[in-house]
Amino acid sequence: MRDIKLPMSEADAKSLKLGEMVTVSGLLFTGRSRLHIRAVEDNIFPPIDYEKINCFFHVGPVMRQNGDEWEVVSCEPTSSIRFERYGADVVRKFNLRTLIGKTTMGPRTAEALKEVGGVYLTKIGLSGNALRGQVKKVHDVHFLDELGKTECTWIYEVENFGPFFVAIDADGNNYFEDLAREADAKMPEIEAELGIPEGYTYTEVNG
Amino acid sequence: MIKREVVTDAMYNAIRLGATKMPPDIRAALQRALEEELDPMAKKHLEVSLQNADLSEKGNGLVCADTGFPMFFVHAGKSTVIEGGFNTLKACAEEATARATAECFLRPTMVHPLTRKNPGDNIGPGMPKMELIFDREDDGLEIIAAPKGGGSEIFGTFYRMMFPADGEAGIKKFVIECIKDACYAGKVCPPAIIGVGIGGTADLCMGLAKKAALLRPIGAHHPDPEVARLEKELYDAARKLGIGPMGSRGINAVLAINLDIAVTHTAALPVAVNAQCLVGRRWVARIDGNGNINYTGVLENA
Ligand code: SF4
């Protein structure tokens, strides 16, 4: 399995194939809904060098404070599809070449990733406990008091972080959209086997 | 009489164990699914998830970091007496939740729905959710703690008021479409346990779906053979979608489909769907009349 250095180069991003499993090493920043909404609606975002820290990890980790040090108790990627309304704007604003999360993102984010030459990686199984061991250092935290431990932005240094797989490649192809089309194609046969008449519709009461 | 601190301890330990251990029937079902899947990615999803549960059990980590909505189902008996009366159960649930959150067994996830303010202890109006059910013969208390993940609740909840003419075909169409949507891109973290409520009022219907998803052990079926037949037909159909673990190409979109029913209005056919994710989190504390507590991941057959 390939390990990709962060920040991810455009060449690396373009070489990744849909469905390929990878790990990543380097610096990343975390965030969820609040980061997306505030960055786009209010132009408030973590003051970091986005050229160096260019990987956005969708997560609300469980963090424990021991003296001055922060420890990651668990970090399970969170559902990225929730951020689709803001995803494309955030990718363009910070020129993000790596997104890591759970589920997938929609066509607008895929289009933005294609523009900047970036990819979306999604989680394999539940791996929060393995991932926490791959966080080598918690470098910094932004907006902790305002947003709390789950929604604030952490800066992690990670090593062989993953594995994840490529769910949206740098050409904007989406692994899950392909699979959904396959499932849709199977539906008529499945419905027939369940005894649902062809062309069945629910009773409509709203005119 | 069961002492108040015994109840609080039982609730705390049940939710802590629920957050850090995978129930044995769920683990066995995931293992079976792993043996059955063919696609390397489908297999990898399950392998990694089972390893993650091992790590969590060994290192006191979490089976999944999103410990979600704190929920307690409390079964009481005919002659159960609690110090301070049944009213005290809510306070016990709050203390147990706050303690488990402070000790990092629960992530502070509950926020105000409008201001989005996070109190940091998972407590607020309606949360933790506690349901009291009087269905035991003895003087004990059974507490089932079920920290319910966001993915399964947010992406796995559906309701439709159908009509008698929509019939069984309508129920089946609705349920199979819900499963396809819920499992798209692994939204509810499949293989999921799908609870389906049929009948009652809207809230009763959804409650049936939720309890069918959360509180029935894998392998148990509805006692009514007609309902059990529907469960089996829908289960077989879901396995043909081509959707597997975490939304990959595979067979096991679901571990089980559990239906439950209530009588309903002669003009109505309400159907609700609620999904439980692959970690199937719940842990049971049984307290006898003398206050002795016994913890287990095994549910009594519903
Ligand atoms: S839905 Fe997935 S991410 Fe959420 S609690 Fe369940 S297993 Fe964890």
Image (cartoon, grey):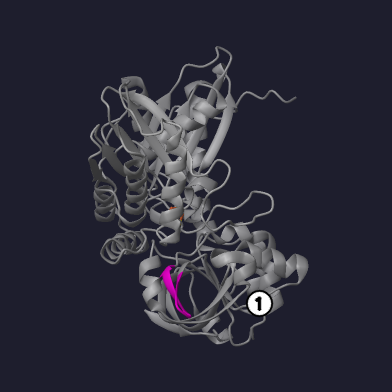
A41 relative to B300, above or below? below
Residue occupied by mark 1: A46
Hey, what amino acid is under mark 1?
Answer: Pro
Instruction: Specify the quadrant of the image occupied by residue A20.
Output: bottom left
What is the crowding at mark 1: few (fewer than 14 residues within 10 Å), some, or many (at least 20)? some
Local SS, label 1: loop
Count every numbered label the image shows and give the total. Answer: 1
| Image spot of residue B291 (x, y percent) | 25, 38
Q: Which residues are magenta?
A: A64-74
| Image spot of residue B126 (x, y percent) | 55, 40
B55 relative to B178, above or below? below
Residue drawn at point x = 32 percent, y = 52 percent: B17
| Image spot of residue B123 (x, y percent) | 53, 49
Q: Is residue B27 magenta?
A: no
Q: Chain of mark 1?
A: A
Residue drawn at point x = 40 percent, y = 36 percent: B73
- The answer to whether residue B19 of the structure is visible from this angle is yes
Query: In this orientation, which residue lies closer to the viewer: B145 or B100?
Result: B100
Residue drawn at point x = 31 percent, y = 43 percent: B6
